[in-house]
Image (cartoon, rainbow, N blue to C red):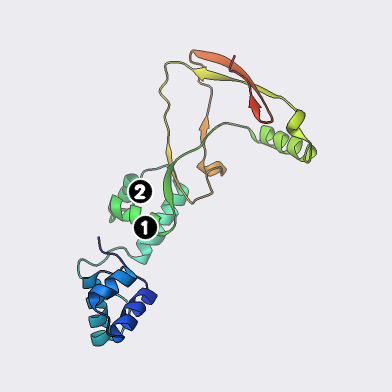
Amino acid sequence: MSVEYTPSKHGRVLQLRDLNYSYREIEKITGVSKTTAQETVKCDKNHHTRKSLPRSGHPSTITTHNHRQVIHELKQHQFEPYKTIAERSHDLTEQQVHTITHDAGFHCCIAVCKPFLTEAAIEKRVKWADENDGCNWETVIWTDESTIELRKRPVHLHVTRHPGEEYLPECIQLTFHSGRQSLMVWAAIAHGRKGPLI
């Protein structure tokens, strides 16, 4: 894969060449390979530009409509794989969907798992947090219990999202108690300390 250098790097190459530095000396000073330095000087002389010329090859077939369509589908179905979104878009491949989402700043990540909470439970927790804001928790011991389901392989879903959106409701993988054989555990934590699982 070729390295794309900045216009300022190209400018440094041209400056050194104007000062009669050899291409080997330019390579040692700038880190730009001898071949690339030669192409830079040639491009400046023939095309009067420091930017790399467009590469030959098959042009991108992704249209603006394709881009809007994929982003719309993605926002509606963030847990669906790229292949499914490509099939729904008809004229796109899985790789093209990946390219569109990557260019738009999306990443496919393992979703954060959180227990399902009703709206009433969420409001109750937010109210409690507001009422206890500013408390000193260094002298408090927190306890909780949970269930671990036995003989169950965990299923980790992937979600396509922007960085920093892992805890948004639409990006979380909700977990539910299935009623299968399970093991109850209890634990406690405090400031800088944690107890054993019981």
Q: Quick one: SS at disc 1?
A: helix
Find disc 1 in the rendering and name its residue. Answer: 100
Residue 182 lies left or right of residue 55; in this view the side is right
- SS under mark 2: helix
Q: Position of residue 11 (x, y in %)?
A: 35, 79
When asked about the image quadrant of residue 137, the answer is: top right
User: Of residues 132 and 17, which is closer to you in this image?
Assistant: 17
Q: Is residue 122 left or right of residue 175?
A: right
The amino acid type of the residue labelled 1 equals Ile
Q: 194 or 153: nearer the eye?
A: 194
In the picture shown, does residue 78 fall above or below 120?
A: below
Question: Which residue is pictured at 31% across the width and 78% down the height?
Answer: 13
Could you say which disc has been placed on residue 85 in the image?
Answer: 2
At x 27% / y 81%, what residue is drawn?
21
Point out residue 55 in the picture as x, y percentages from the top left corner: 23, 71
Rendering quarter of residue 147: top right
In the image, 95: left or right of 170? left
Three-letter code for the amino acid on which mark 2 is drawn:
Ile
Q: Using the image as rendered, state which of residue 134 and residue 150 is in the foreground.
A: 134
What separation in Å lies between label 2 and label 1 (alpha carbons)?
A: 12 Å
- Above or below 193: residue 98: below
Q: Is residue 30 left or right of residue 157?
A: left
Quick one: label 2 or label 1, which is nearer the N terminus?
Answer: 2
- Crowd around label 1: few <14 · some 14–19 · many ≥20 (10 Å): some
The image's mark for residue 17 is: none
Q: Which residue is rendered at x = 43% and y = 59% of the image?
A: 104
Give the foreground label among 2 and 1: 1
